[in-house]
Image (spheres, helix red, strand yellow):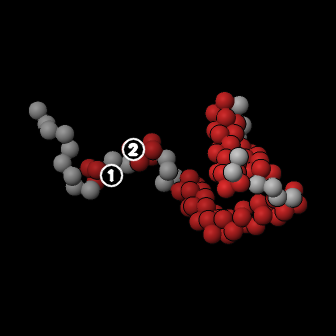
Amino acid sequence: MPPELQPILAAVLSVVALIVLVTRLRVHPFLGLLVASLMLGFLAGLVPADIIKKFGKGFGDVMGSVGIIIGLGTMLGGVLVLSGGADRRRLVSLRSVARAGFPGPPSS
């Protein structure tokens, strides 16, 4: 096999492994991504210590940029639940449409 095809083959095998882990074996997607990334590192010829360092750095970079958004969204959802703003029955019982001045159903 030509050496320039080895990284492509490693990536394809890792993606196939991820799909099989998540769809067929019902592994949690995060654990499937972890296993697929470790597999890709091994197939790429990295030393296990380097694989763990690179995974930790990549995960930290992603969580550093996305983690704040996820945290703020979680807090906003919690505030909505505690205030009752996410309760559908409460919204229907307020009859907000009639109070806003929109016409109701036609009367007979």
Residue at horizontal 14 percent and vertical 38 percent from the top: 106
Q: Can see residue 18? A: no
On screen, residue 54 versus residue 62, left or right, reads right
Residue 49 locus on image (x, y percent): 88, 60
* Residue matched to label 2: 93
Residue at horizontal 67 percent and vertical 35 percent from the top: 20
Q: Amino acid at mark 1?
A: Ser
On screen, residue 15 versus residue 43, left or right, reads left
Within the image, what quadrant is residue 92 found in? top left
Residue 68 locus on image (x, y percent): 63, 68
Residue at horizontal 67 percent and vertical 56 percent from the top: 4
Q: Which mark is residue 96?
A: 1
> Crowding near pointer 1: few (<14 within 10 Å), some, many (20+)?
few
Q: Nearer the viewer, residue 90 or 47?
A: 47
Q: In the current view of this chain or complex, which residue is farthest to the top?
A: 24
Q: In the current view of this chain or complex, which residue is farthest to the left?
A: 108
Within the image, what quadrant is residue 7 found in? bottom right
Residue 73 locus on image (x, y percent): 57, 61
Residue 78 locus on image (x, y percent): 60, 57
Rendered view: 9 above or below 54: above
Q: Nearer the viewer, residue 70 or 103?
A: 70
Mark 1 vs mark 2, CA separation in Å: 8 Å
Q: Amino acid at mark 2?
A: Ser
Helix, strand or loop for disc 2: helix
> Crowding near pointer 2: few (<14 within 10 Å), some, many (20+)?
few
